[in-house]
Image (cartoon, rainbow, N blue to C red):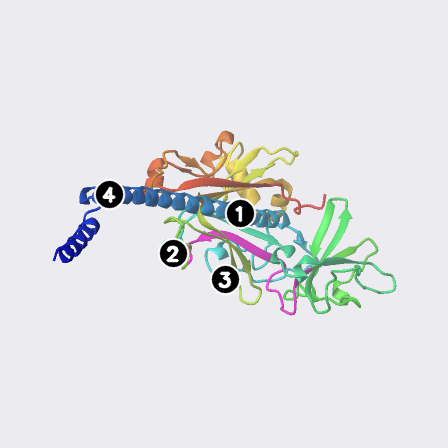
Amino acid sequence: MIKAGKVIMDENINKMRYACPLAGEAGFTLVEMIVVTAVFIVVLIIAGDSFKTILTRSSLLSKSAESNIEGIVGLEMFRHDLNQAGFGLPWSFGGGITPVYEEAEDAPASYFNDKPSGIPRAFVAGNDLAAASTGDPDKVDYLVLKGTSLAGTSQSQRWTYVNYSSVGSSRPRIWSAENLSDNDRVIVLRRAFTETGYVNQLVSSDQSHFFTKFSKDGLPSAFAPSLPQDTYYVYGLTGNEDPRMPFNRIDYHLKRPVGIATSCAENTGTLYKSLLNHSNGKFTEIPIMDCVADMQVVFGWDLNEDGVIDAYSNADGSTVNGGDTAAVQATMGDAGLIRNRLKVVKVYLLVQDGRRDPSFRNSNSIVVGNDSLGEKSLTKEYTVANIDDKKWTNYRWKVYRIVVTPKNLTLK
């Protein structure tokens, strides 16, 4: 009995040993667990908020970097086209023939036509045009460039010349590469130097044929030099398509397309480079830059043609600094005066910099121009009230500037 009782006692002692932890082996109390859990939750909240901030800043920086890259590419394309304006344009119509041509069909592009028989102007612009559709940027400038090389097609990038031949050969100069192909549509300019200066006349066989088909074996007799002092220059326009006008044309403008990036602020749009199609007078639109709020154009004029800029104007010449408004507007309507007097073209673009930042509030007015040169009156100023009204308050903005001295307006 004693032995059996001892065994039972040993078993009870073992059970107690496992039921009651020894000193130093105690677990966490409920209060300790609650405190630890609370601390852990607080740490998670802080870490999550920090991570959210990092993501937000990273997104803002990424969008800003993307905007900068897009801006550089778009601005260089814009700058290239500004430099090409005027290339291959006729200065007059020769042979007593006034050709009839077509241009843009629809407004507002049609406002800047020189059709049906006007000498084409290399630069034409509209000032603070009203939005064409709801949601489009309002009161922004519109810029038109004209020149044979503006289309960007292989034909429009090529040219050659034909010299007079006493034996009747009118074969054009053939280069080692990049020549025009047979049947490419071209215009021909008669270029010569006279007592009054250079002659750069469009050669036409009749009113409707201001162009001809290129051939390496020679041009039609109506498009071949007939005088020893003449050299005819041949500029490519289109491939197998008859041109509707003796030049190519590109319009730069803003509009807000369907599907614009959701990161773009309200009342901003896309800058488009629009190529006028010879087939129908409509445009092929190429998006250049998103989230653009405004475009402003400034022209610098040498009104007395002494080689010094003496006046600056807005896009349509309605406001002028330093010169006579009537003289500027008369110049802008005449292709020859534009060639002789236009010395500098400035384009300013107001562009969104990054995404919306709720922690940022714009507190400064923005001049879309060079205020130190007095261009505020020629361009536009957005006050803080304007910025608030357009819902641009929580966005950062930058002004891009392109300044070009036209290189293809004259032969000098």
Give the mark toward the camera: 3 or 2: 2
Disc sitting over residue 23 in the figure: none
The residue beneath circle 3 is: 105
How far across and down, in percent of the image, does residue 330 sit? 55, 43
Q: Amino acid at mark 2?
A: Ser
Q: Nearer the viewer, residue 164 or 280?
A: 280
- The crowding category of the residue bearing disc 3, from other C-alpha atoms within 10 Å (few below 14, some 14 to 19, many at least 20), is some
Q: Nearer the viewer, residue 370 or 282?
A: 370
- Residue in the picture at 68% in, 45% down: 410
Q: Nearer the viewer, residue 19 or 307?
A: 19
How far across and down, in percent of the image, does residue 67 sit? 49, 47
Q: Amino acid at mark 3?
A: Glu
Give the mark toward the camera: 4 or 2: 4
Please say whether residue 354 is visible from this viewpoint.
no
In the rendered structure, the answer to whether residue 412 lies left or right of residue 276 reads right
Give the distance between the C-alpha atoms of the residues marked 4 and 2, in whole angstroms. Answer: 56 Å
The residue beneath circle 1 is: 69
Give the distance between the C-alpha atoms of the residues marked 4 and 1, in whole angstroms. Answer: 46 Å
The residue beneath circle 4 is: 38
What segment is highlighted magenta in the picture?
A: 236-257
- Residue in the picture at 41% in, 40% down: 396
Q: Secondary structure at mark 1?
A: helix
Quadrant for the C terminus in the image: top right
Give the mark toward the camera: 2 or 1: 1
Q: Earlier in the sequence, mark 2 or mark 1?
A: 1
Q: Secondary structure at mark 3?
A: loop
Q: Earlier in the sequence, mark 4 or mark 2?
A: 4
